[in-house]
Image (tube, helix red, strand yellow):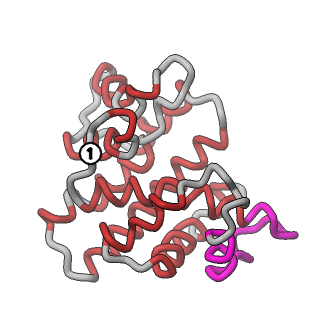
Amino acid sequence: MISREAALKIIEEHVENKNIIKHMIALEAVMGEVYRELKKKGKDEKSLGGTEAEYQMAGLLHDGDYCDEVPPEKQGIQITEWVKDLGFELPDNVSHAMAAHNWHNTGIKPLNLMDWTIFCADSLTGLIVAACLVLPSKKLVDLKVESVLKRFKEPSFAKGTRREEIALGEEKLGIPLNEFVKISLSAMQGIHEELGL
């Protein structure tokens, strides 16, 4: 599988917006943390749909084709083509998860826990960042789960957040919303320096 270093290089060549890159790095961390939580809950390899490294790579690369040159129906698919065109390997399950995170546009539906994790967690990272940015310190380490949950219940806050997708985590992953937020926030706090928050 492609290395993290090589994946970051491809991302940086195609994605100009540094905040989108930080979002992908955040989702990489969240995907790894959710994987570990699902393993603790006794999920088997088949239902998980991938390894921890594959979960993380799907998170890291998922918006690597989020740019003007790629139409919405190809976003999540084009990145796989770019990676393979450069001679790198990318497992089919990682490619599927990336395409499924945008399944309303790609038509490629989530099938397993890895697919549903990327789909449900994608918007949650943005909500966490938005909740962090209204703090006086603008620091993830100062953000509390309760604050994120409060903001989740305010539709006027971070209007672009797809709350219904985040909420699906309970049904599709078996992780209640408050736990999902706690896991995701903890993952992002663990890389706060890399995120600049």
Q: Position of residue 28 (x, y in %)?
A: 45, 55
Query: What amino acid is at disc 1?
Result: Lys
Task: Say if residue 97 shows up in the picture.
Answer: yes
Q: What predominant SS class does the magenta segment belong to?
A: helix
Is 41 in front, or is 178?
178
Quarter-of-image position of residue 153: bottom right
Q: Is residue 149 above or below residue 17?
A: below
**42 on left or right of 177:** left
Q: Is residue 118 above or below residue 139?
A: above
The C terminus lies in which quarter of the figure? bottom right
Residue found at x 42% / y 35%: 6
Q: Farthest residue in the front direction?
A: 155
Q: Which residues are magenta?
A: 132-152
Is 175 in front, or is 86?
175
Query: Is residue 104 magenta-colored?
Result: no
- The residue that disc 1 covers is 109
Helix, strand or loop at mark 1: loop
Is 79 in front, or is 8?
79
Q: Is residue 143 above or below residue 5?
A: below
Residue found at x 30% / y 61%: 52
The N terminus lies in which quarter of the figure? top left
Q: Position of residue 73 (x, y in %)?
A: 39, 27
Quarter-of-image position of residue 191: bottom right
Is 26 in front, or is 117?
117
**155 on left or right of 185:** right
Q: Position of residue 36 (x, y in %)?
A: 33, 73
Q: Farthest residue in the right direction?
A: 136
Residue found at x 36% / y 60%: 117
**180 on left or right of 74:** right
Quarter-of-image position of residue 67: top right
